[in-house]
Image (cartoon, helix red, strand yellow):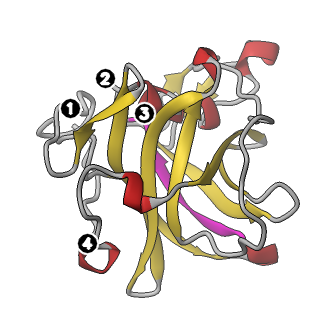
Amino acid sequence: MSAALRKIPIFVAAFAAVLLCSCIKTDGSTHVECPAAVASDQAQTPRGISSVDGVWLMLDKDANNEPESVIVVYERGGVRSAKMVAIYHNGKIDDTIEKPLERAKGLEGNPPLCGLDFVWDLKPSDGGKYVGKVVNPDDGGVYRCKLWVDVPSQRLVLRGELFVFGESEYLVPFDAAKLPFNLDVSKLSPVLPKSE
């Protein structure tokens, strides 16, 4: 499974590494996730980004901020979603929505990770933030999340939350021209996860 999507639990059951707490999923079952997340200070981003919409690069903090995956945040019918469109392996993109390889083992039908909307139902909230849902494709757990642009750092913040606990993942802008396929965001449609 992609290391990028293994990071989803980072912002789903946060502070667990420090607090060693047990978290409860939305279905009421107990679940513990403990990875820590740290913002990437090495990423260079252009100034002037104010919209969550667009193409973003997730960096692997456990591997010296190497590129990990590419996601697209887009709007359909007044709500936003985040779709995985490419995954890096050994420093190059080899898993895409056009040629998907890895599968989401915790979701019904084990759909490909690339092409899956792992964040969905994002609706406007206070302070330029969007509130929606994020899924852990390893076990199908669904959690509340927030998405916004941190204007000073020009990074996209994806924050998973469970009650008062939360953890943030930071993404940097990505040039879609660097993808090995032509990405037409206007043709994307939501592919929502289904838990088993």
Marker disc for residue 189: 4
Q: Main secondary structure of the magenta part?
A: strand
* Label 3 to label 2: alpha-carbon separation: 7 Å
Residue at (24%, 44%) from the top-left corner?
96
Marker disc for residue 26: none
Marker disc for residue 1: 2
**Would you say the residues marked 4 and 3 are in contact, meaning their CB atoms lie under 8 Å apart?**
no
Q: Residues within 10 Å of mark 3 (few under 14, many from 20)?
A: many
Residue at (24%, 48%) from the top-left corner?
194
**Residue reaching furthest right?**
152
Q: Residues within 10 Å of mark 2 (few under 14, many from 20)?
A: few
* Label 4 to label 3: alpha-carbon separation: 20 Å
* Label 4 to label 2: alpha-carbon separation: 23 Å
- In the rendered structure, which amino acid carries the disc numbered 3? Leu
Marker disc for residue 5: 3
Mark toward the start of the polypeptide (4 vs 3): 3
Residue annotated with mark 1: 103
For the residue pair 106 and 5, the one nearer the viewer reads as 5
The answer to which quarter of the image holds residue 43 is top right
Residue at (58%, 20%) from the top-left corner?
33
Mark toward the start of the polypeptide (1 vs 2): 2
